[in-house]
Image: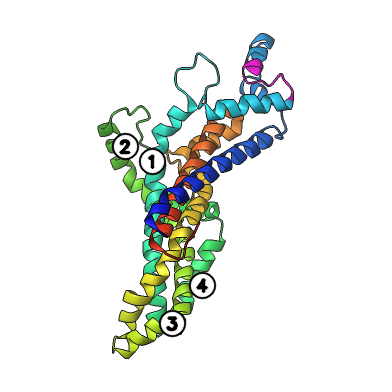
Amino acid sequence: MKKTRIPIFFAKKAVGAVITIFLVMSILFVLLHSVAGGDMVTRLHPFASAEEKAELRELWGLDKPLFEQYIVFMKKVFTLDYRLTQDQQTTSMDTLLFFLPYTILLFGTATITSYIIGIYLGVQLLSWRSNGLKTLVSGMSIIFYSVPAFVLAISFKRWLIFKYQIFPPVNIFNGEASTLFEHLENIQMLLPAMALPLIVLVLVGLARPLLLLRDHMTLLLDEPFVLTARAKGLSRNTVLSEHVARCAILPLMSDASINLALIFSGGILIEYIFSWPGIGMQLFSALRSLYYPTIAAAIFLLTLLLLTSMIIVDTLNAYLDPRVSL
């Protein structure tokens, strides 16, 4: 793609992202209002007076027809008004932004690590002579990918934290950190406890880059440029690592953004299971009480993060790959 068309490409992706956020939040509204057991006010303040309940329902439009409730909800979403009451000083978005660095630390590290290891093993699978070793690595990656992440997390936590005490639990965290130095102190305290959830996320996310790279490289082995490189006398390992792998890695960029979404979706339970102080932990706690402000803010923020990563990846693909067009 020509460099001059990149802004147009980026603008179209941005418009599509706004439409996606609108649809996601609309679906969230439907899901929240289809939950049995009463509305948010009934769940949050079951023993409040009738006047207090009526005031809170009026603020969120819960005493109005469903369409008007939808208008009130979407207005709060896109004006970033994630407060339960008007006099609330700290919004749910402020709280989530406080925990955002810790979520990015865990899931960003897991995504980068899984792709580094997956790309390395994907290249090595074609260079190894032992078919048994290839089958073992591929089979184990598929097994870990197929098993739900929360099952691995619960099992690993039970055996490696509680029973054998190989990894420490998350039990030290300053929830009132306000300066960069205090956040860095939190991260330093959390690093030992991050090892086990990181291992779980890497095991779950390893199969996609490994198998996709292997399949892409297999398709490229009969291409003319590969035959030319072999005819020049280059070794098989050199051809695989310096020629075939470079061409096969480009499609993985698009998959990385999709895999990030899968890691995030499964990571909500991972954070809860390991008591990791992140957005997933806050979202899970809000879902238990149907706390609209935190639920809406968390889904909005996570959707925005995922769409931003996908736009960046698609723009890079359009810039690097001349075959990508508008």
Label 3, label 2: how far apart the Cα atoms are: 51 Å
Q: Please state the horizontal and vertical placement of residue 155, each as a whole percent of the image.
A: 51, 54
Residue 63 shown in magenta? yes
Which mark, residue 102? 1
Question: Which of labels 3 and 2 is toward the front?
Answer: 3
- Identify the secondary structure beneath mark 3: loop
Label 2, label 4: how far apart the Cα atoms are: 38 Å
Residue drawn at (60%, 41%) of the image = 24
Which mark, residue 186? 2
Image: magenta residue range: 56-65
Sooner in the amino-acid sequence: mark 4 or mark 1: 1
Q: Tag 3: residue type?
A: Glu
Which mark, residue 139? 4
Sooner in the amino-acid sequence: mark 2 or mark 4: 4
Label 1, label 2: how far apart the Cα atoms are: 9 Å
- Identify the secondary structure beneath mark 4: helix
Q: Is residue 26 left or right of residue 10?
A: right
